[in-house]
Image (spheres, rainbow, N blue to C red):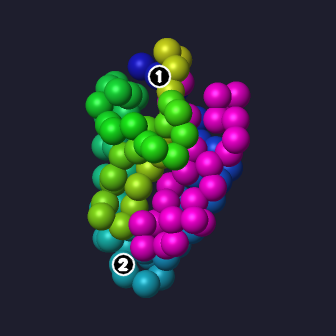
Amino acid sequence: MRKVVFSKSASFGIDKLLHYLESEWSVKDKQNFIQKLDIAVLQICKYPLSTEKSSLKSGLHRLVITKQTTLYYTHNEKRVFIVAIFDTRQNPNKLKIKKSISTY
């Protein structure tokens, strides 16, 4: 199975989202999101081409985790590189994908 690597931006996004869920919703909602994220990561590790290609950058894929959260990633034979976790309620111009995602 492919190794999963999170960018600093994706790690920060997850931490921020988990803190928000726990403080504004509940621990149960946070745990439910973690479970959905785990399932999503397993899916893209096993079947990286199973999701739609993103129009943001060549080689980038996107997976909707919840209607509010989208995961952007790229992959090769050995790794899945999680580029960003994006809250879809934000302005899409805030999503900044690094110029060189292929250097993971």
Question: Which residue is identified by label 2?
Answer: 26
Q: Amino acid at mark 1?
A: Arg
Question: Is residue 81 on the magenta stretch?
Answer: yes
Q: Tell whether 56 sits left or right of 9.
A: left
**Vertical comparison of 77 with 29: above or below:** above
Residue at point 62%, 49% (across, down): 97
Q: Tell whether 9 sits left or right of 50.
A: right
Viewer-side residue, 73 vs 41:
73
Residue 38 appears in view: no
Which stretch did the figure color magenta?
Answer: 79-104
Residue farthest along the bottom direction in this orientation: 24
Say few, some or many: other residues with alpha carbon within 10 Å of mark 1 (under 14 / 14 to 19 / 20 or more): some
Residue at point 50%, 55% (across, down): 85
Residue farthest along the top direction in this orientation: 77
State the mark number for residue 30. Answer: none
Q: Amino acid at mark 2?
A: Ser
Q: Which element type, helix, strand or loop, lies under badge 1? A: loop
Say few, some or many: other residues with alpha carbon within 10 Å of mark 2 (under 14 / 14 to 19 / 20 or more): few
Residue 104 drawn at (x, y percent): 67, 29
Residue at point 49%, 60% (across, down): 86
Question: Which residue is identified by label 1?
Answer: 2
Q: Tell whether 95 sits left or right of 70.
A: right
